[in-house]
Image: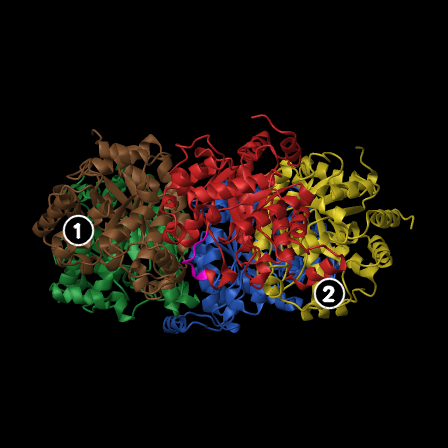
Chain colours: A blue, B yellow, C red, D brown, E green
Amino acid sequence: MEMSTSVKKILQNYESDNPGTKTNLARLLSHGRLGGTGKMIILPVDQGFEHGAGRSFSCNPDAYDPHYHFQLAIDAGLSAYAAPLGMLEAGAATFAGAIPTILKMNSGNSLSRATTESLMSDQAVTSSISDALRLGCSAIGFTIYPGSDHMYDMYEEIRELAEEAKSCGLAVIIWSYARGNMSKVGETAIDVIAYGAHMAALLGAHIIKVKLPSEHLEVEAAKKEYLKNNVDISTLEKRVRHVVESCFNGRRLVVFSGGDAKGVDGIYEDTRAIRDGHGNGSIIGRNCFQRPRVEALKMLDKMVDTYLGKA
Amino acid sequence: MEMSTSVKKILQNYESDNPGTKTNLARLLSHGRLGGTGKMIILPVDQGFEHGAGRSFSCNPDAYDPHYHFQLAIDAGLSAYAAPLGMLEAGAATFAGAIPTILKMNSGNSLSRATTESLMSDQAVTSSISDALRLGCSAIGFTIYPGSDHMYDMYEEIRELAEEAKSCGLAVIIWSYARGNMSKVGETAIDVIAYGAHMAALLGAHIIKVKLPSEHLEVEAAKKEYLKNNVDISTLEKRVRHVVESCFNGRRLVVFSGGDAKGVDGIYEDTRAIRDGHGNGSIIGRNCFQRPRVEALKMLDKMVDTYLGKA
Amino acid sequence: MEMSTSVKKILQNYESDNPGTKTNLARLLSHGRLGGTGKMIILPVDQGFEHGAGRSFSCNPDAYDPHYHFQLAIDAGLSAYAAPLGMLEAGAATFAGAIPTILKMNSGNSLSRATTESLMSDQAVTSSISDALRLGCSAIGFTIYPGSDHMYDMYEEIRELAEEAKSCGLAVIIWSYARGNMSKVGETAIDVIAYGAHMAALLGAHIIKVKLPSEHLEVEAAKKEYLKNNVDISTLEKRVRHVVESCFNGRRLVVFSGGDAKGVDGIYEDTRAIRDGHGNGSIIGRNCFQRPRVEALKMLDKMVDTYLGKA
Amino acid sequence: MEMSTSVKKILQNYESDNPGTKTNLARLLSHGRLGGTGKMIILPVDQGFEHGAGRSFSCNPDAYDPHYHFQLAIDAGLSAYAAPLGMLEAGAATFAGAIPTILKMNSGNSLSRATTESLMSDQAVTSSISDALRLGCSAIGFTIYPGSDHMYDMYEEIRELAEEAKSCGLAVIIWSYARGNMSKVGETAIDVIAYGAHMAALLGAHIIKVKLPSEHLEVEAAKKEYLKNNVDISTLEKRVRHVVESCFNGRRLVVFSGGDAKGVDGIYEDTRAIRDGHGNGSIIGRNCFQRPRVEALKMLDKMVDTYLGKA
Amino acid sequence: MEMSTSVKKILQNYESDNPGTKTNLARLLSHGRLGGTGKMIILPVDQGFEHGAGRSFSCNPDAYDPHYHFQLAIDAGLSAYAAPLGMLEAGAATFAGAIPTILKMNSGNSLSRATTESLMSDQAVTSSISDALRLGCSAIGFTIYPGSDHMYDMYEEIRELAEEAKSCGLAVIIWSYARGNMSKVGETAIDVIAYGAHMAALLGAHIIKVKLPSEHLEVEAAKKEYLKNNVDISTLEKRVRHVVESCFNGRRLVVFSGGDAKGVDGIYEDTRAIRDGHGNGSIIGRNCFQRPRVEALKMLDKMVDTYLGKA
């Protein structure tokens, strides 16, 4: 693995990390078709925990097999594959070394009463740093819910896990999904998304994952400042750019999730906005494995090309 | 102990486990009359904790003696015997090496107010991994209640216990019983059972125990997908098959509980459906020890024959 | 100390315990006038925690002094003396080796609001296994409240303490007192008492302490089974026998508490029922120390004689 | 330090303690003008935590300085000085060896909502045994609130701290202040005070601190016994004596707090009652530092003389 | 680094601390333009956690970059720079040794429901002592909310962190912000501010940070004493002086926060009052980074001059 100039430059931003963590960040940034460009596409498969197996995979029954997802991520030339404990255990040896893996360490599920009473939204920690190490992972993934009554507990969980991960040379990725003490539309408001991303950075994340932000401004006190200071949030590209500056002005990598399954054109449009707004890539799950493999590969191919400036 | 081809093939699915855990999985799969077939029948006796001694055993007073159950499982040629701490302590030396044992590590009881207010359903952890090791067990058993307000706590308990168990070479069996935030009939709905089984797999279980699913679909969003994708849930066999695919498409063993005491014909019918749907066996308690020993042995004999394809 | 045949036979039931715990069980069974018979009388003095000093001891002011109780238990030839931390600390050196002692590790008190809102009944853990060891105790005592909302927490406390106690060669005695999610009369119902005793056995207790059961049947589902299976609960002796069978059919020792202070005739009658129903003895506190010493000694003498078959 | 016969006799009561703890008890009993008499006067200054600095010290501004209190206790020839972490840190080196110190390990404050909703009364643990050791303390002090909903948590905190303290050779002093599930006047009722003192003794305290009890009887069931058994509570001296007998009949030291600031005559009267009722001394804070230094010294001088039988 | 007489004198007040902590206190007191004077100005940047990135930095977009704040503090000749984990990680290597840093270890955020229901105000612990050490920090910072229902938990958190910090030679700074069980205006009432500062001192803080107090008296019982004892709170200088005496009569350093962004004249006035009231300096965040860099430097320059007596 020889590091590109882009990757070297990015690693310089992680100035307090030990060589182990830098090595794993380099692995994530150097693998796959986007290797060396500073962009990433990550395949996350924790949908089965969130929604159940049948609801997630019955439209594409091959996806019931954990090996399917490893192979898809590899064949598409993606940067990394992220999944909860059991999914990784079921394939980590077969695919050892074939693609960087990310252990998604907490998960929620839709049987919980807290889904509808979202002020109480929470997740369970379902694996450990030891698990990540024995499975050969490069990073851990962890979800926080800024705005939920459980938010501080979640922050304290990732605080402890991130400290252990960093001391073991792993990278830390925080999924920052605002919910709870806000309107439904507020969950993807630009001020809220940027706030959630910034908190993830403050919590010490190396890579931050958020949803793509809308033009809505949710918090009154924030709205006032955005308007007063003419923060340009008129296009998705501009909003991506604002999220990037909220992540220590680009000193931290930020990737965007694709959201609900949707048409490929919307996805390509999102990808261009992420690219042009200087986002670092996509984390795209349902839109991959809920499509037939051939279609998913084709779509991912075009997303890669987009990030490479070929599309 | 020489491993059959079936067992060898199953063990390959546990690709991330250490040789100790593989050894114990091999023990569970190689013991008794079904040894080597990939099928299992397990005798669980935690009914006394759930319902009390008199209510559980007065119909067959020999069953008050813990040795009775060890002997029954041995004489019936079953795969393993599962029980809470005290029950195993009372017989583990006498029957050392005679049959693989499973320490059931948490238990609930029906004196709890939470039985009727089932959103709060929970269990107490009543033993430790050290206990399992000093008693010579091959596996631990642990119940989760997907849908209960305590579900995340239970997930975090088994997370910690499973990690320790695996590091000590024990196998992990999760009893996944949905309840709480759903209708009573929803607890055995096919979407809910498959969801609960899938989460157990994601939590890292080697073997998953669920109830036999009904044709009911409980969760609206899941129902939509099942119908859209024509998931065949029309027969018990088909539903078992769907549960099996929800357990990493068969990469994890799944066994089915017998439920309430009932007539033997119903039990044989269930057994055939489990076999034909590619389930890995039965875990059957009350239907064994609440029958006279002779009748229980006869019934178990026929179940074994069914799994062997002789009935 | 030479072990009697009775004691040897009892010790065989504790087949999973280490020699240290067997030694301490042997001490409890070999001490005092009942030594070697398999019967025990234990003096417990935790009444001061439960009700206060004045309410407990003002009727017999000598009892304010912790040494009084050690001496009473010794002079009466009892099997053991049980008390909370401070009481043992105040006499353990003076009476070192004179009588086996039991550290009562948790205690409740009647100033708590939870006494009247009994669904919340709980106790505080007030000492440690290290305390038991440094004070030379043979066993620990611990109360659980099956039916209370705190029951699972209490189970998890004793789980942890019992594991540590056993690993240190101590014996474990569980006081199992049902309360909370039941009627007042249900607390001593035969089905509830037998259930509570059985759970204590499942939790790994070596010796189980319960109240003497009444003929009442509390839980509807249990009642049905008791009636259907003609469980004989018509006399106290028969009910004691049912509790004994609920404790692994006699593989675990069970002793009965005396309850409120009452007339000696009632106590002798209870003693005979315990003896004839194959119970293993009495644990009797208030009825000892709330009587003048001479009367208490006389009463205990007659109880011993009863267990010896001389009365 | 040569031990008086009185002190030697008292130390014999602490028969289970190690030489380290006996040494520190001896220090407390041998220091100052009352050294060797078995009586003690302790200066506690945690009022600033309870009520704030201005409310506590503005009447005597010299008292803002932590050194003031060390010096006052030394100059008055008191037995020991007790304070929270910060107060001791600010003077422990300057006054090293000059007077035994007690680290008050938990504190409450009057900004808490729980002051008015007293069922929830609690305190925060604000220091550690390591702190006590590095600061050269002879003992730790800890408050419990029998009757509060947090009482069991507080008991479990002191259980753990007391075990560690004893293993390190420190003495343990429990401040036992009943509150919560009782009337306001009940907090100092003789039955409640005696009950609280007894529980502190059962929890393993070496020295117990309570308020002076009134003639009121709070708990109905206790009242019945006190009346039936003619417990003499007619004078303060008699009530002190009853508290002393409730502390293992004098096997544990008990000291009484002065309560609100008041006139010196009342204090002298209290002191005589404590002395004549065989109490072991006074713990007096606000009545010292809320008086000018000269007056405080004069008052303490007279209290000492009273305990010495000279006044 | 040679210590000034002022600094030597201040360090003598920290008589219980180890040389490591004294070294770090000396670093804070010896750095920058105020080095050696006993005064300090600290730049804290945790606003992004409290209010979000856009709301905090959009008025001065350079401030999105963590390096901006390090450089500002250095260029202004300030005493130290304080920030949460991520902010320090992003610059600690680049600016190693250039200015003492303070790891702000807990943070709250305004998405929390508890902001409006302020009785529940809390923060999350977001870093560890290990983090402070690996990042080369001189001190830790921690917020407490006296009056909040979570106050005791926060006290216990800082108790544990402060003990570890001190044992590792770090200094401890407590941000003491009263809120919860009081009126809004009561949060800065002189009695409440002085109380909060005193509790921070009792909790073992080396440096205490509070808001500037108003003339209001909030707590009735405190008000009575303030009036009776003629505590002079008529000017800001006098109130600062009262806070200083509440911090062990000046034995602990106390710095004052600037509060909301406001005009520079108000800030200079505050600075003079702090200086003349013998406060130890300012901790000023929003008023720095929410101004253009040039203006901020000019303002800080004048503040420094004011503390130096030149303005």
Looking at the rendered structure, which numbered label has been put on residue B189?
2
Give x and y (percent) for residue B277.
83, 55
Near-viewer residue (C218 or A47): C218
Quarter of the image with the C terminus of chain A is bottom right
Mark 1 neighbour class, 10 Å CA radius: few under 14, some 14 to 19, many 20 or more: many
Q: Is residue E121 left or right of residue C162?
A: left
Specify the segment rendered in magenta.
C108-114
Kind of element beneath mark 1: helix
Quarter of the image with the N terminus of chain A is top right
Looking at the rendered structure, which numbered label has been put on residue E250?
1
The chain ID associated with circle 2 is: B
Give x and y (percent) for residue B88.
67, 41
Query: Which kind of residue does numbered mark 2 sit on?
Result: Ala
The answer to the question of whether label 2 and label 1 lie on touching residues, with beta carbons closer than 8 A, is: no
Name the mark nearer the viewer: 2 or 1. Answer: 2
Measured along the vertical axis of the image, is residue E256 above or below residue C43?
A: below
Residue located at (47% from left, 41% from top): C297
